[in-house]
Amino acid sequence: MRTAILSVLTIVLCLATLSVSAMLGSGINPFLSQDQSFEISVDNEIGTNRYVMIEVDEGDNDEEEMVIETFHEFQFQASADGGLITWDFGDGEVRTGSSVSHQFSTPGLHSVVATYVNGQTIETRTLSVTVYLDSEVEADNMECVCAPTGKDTVIVLSTHEGLSTLAGFVQVEHDGSSESCSLRNPLQECHVRVMVQKLEEGAIIEQEVLFDDTFRSNEYVVDFQFEDLVLEEGQTLQLRLETDQVRDWHKPTAAWTTSVSVE
């Protein structure tokens, strides 16, 4: 009789082991009750940061830069009963709780990992959010810093590593006491040269001229779009505006969006 009972217990244990193994193989955690689940979500999978820089004219070539940055705030939620939930945002920030918020300072595709711990149960879930960046720059008048007979100004477009697309425009507007562009004769037309430059540790490694010509309007706009732009560590992308005429007083402004591809 004892032998029969032991045989029955052995069969029951084997069936239980097979049942647990089957649940683990199917992705079901046997230590998580049927009415308990762990899922994560975000209020919006796409957010846009904003960057605004204005150069304040101090009467010399060393203007003060006023910068305003606004970061989109994502709201993350997790559904689970009890236990500890830890969120890893991949940028050095870690938080705990079933409801947390987070701001990403850089544009791009960000992976968020949430971990749920309850007794012997450890579950992880992952989701991705995309951050775009809208930028605006209002520079002071192009200054005589490149040569005694010319003026230039620099607008930094991107310092962010990885793959992205930049699309926007740069505009020069007549701003000074000299004769306006629209009233000049053909031999004294206003002039501007717009170049995009890639730098590495401050040294120019690539350069492309977007526009280099004269014009006879008090405003001139140059559109640009750089697709599949790749910046590595230590690299930056900038616009350089130049003019060969000392009498040209132009205030450059630019606006552009930095975006990433979403599969």
Image: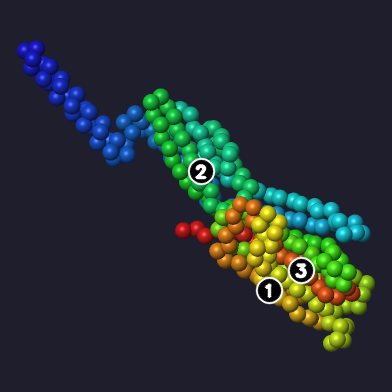
In the picture, residue 125 is in which quadrant?
A: top left
Q: Using the image, determine if residue 98 lies above or below residue 75.
A: above
For discs 3 and 2, the disc positioned in front in the rendered view: 3
Residue 65 located left or right of residue 46: right
Image coordinates of residue 68 in percent, x first then y, are 74, 51
Q: How is the image coloured?
A: rainbow
Image coordinates of residue 63 in percent, x first then y, are 85, 56
Q: Earlier in the sequence, mark 3 or mark 2?
A: 2
Residue type, mark 2 in image = Val
How far apart are labels 3 and 2 at the CA level? 40 Å
In the structure shown, which secondary structural element does the residue marked by tag 3 occupy? strand
The residue that label 1 is drawn on is 210
In the picture, residue 50 is in which quadrant?
A: bottom right
In the structure shown, which secondary structural element does the residue marked by tag 1 occupy? strand
Residue closest to the eye, 195 or 202: 202
Residue 86 located left or right of residue 208: left
Residue type, mark 1 in image = Leu
For discs 1 and 2, the disc positioned in front in the rendered view: 1
- Report if the CB atoms under discs 1 and 2 are less than 8 Å apart: no
In the structure shown, which secondary structural element does the residue marked by tag 2 occupy? strand
Image coordinates of residue 254 in percent, x first then y, are 73, 65
Q: Earlier in the sequence, mark 1 or mark 2?
A: 2
Question: Is residue 38 in view?
Answer: yes
Q: Residues within 10 Å of mark 2 (few under 14, many from 20)?
A: some
* Residue at (86, 83) in percent of width and height: 188
Q: Residues within 10 Å of mark 3 (few under 14, many from 20)?
A: many
Residue type, mark 3 in image = Leu
* Residue at (18, 27) in percent of width and height: 14
Which of the labelled discs sits on residue 112, or is there none?
2
The residue that label 3 is drawn on is 241
* Residue at (62, 63) in percent of width and height: 166
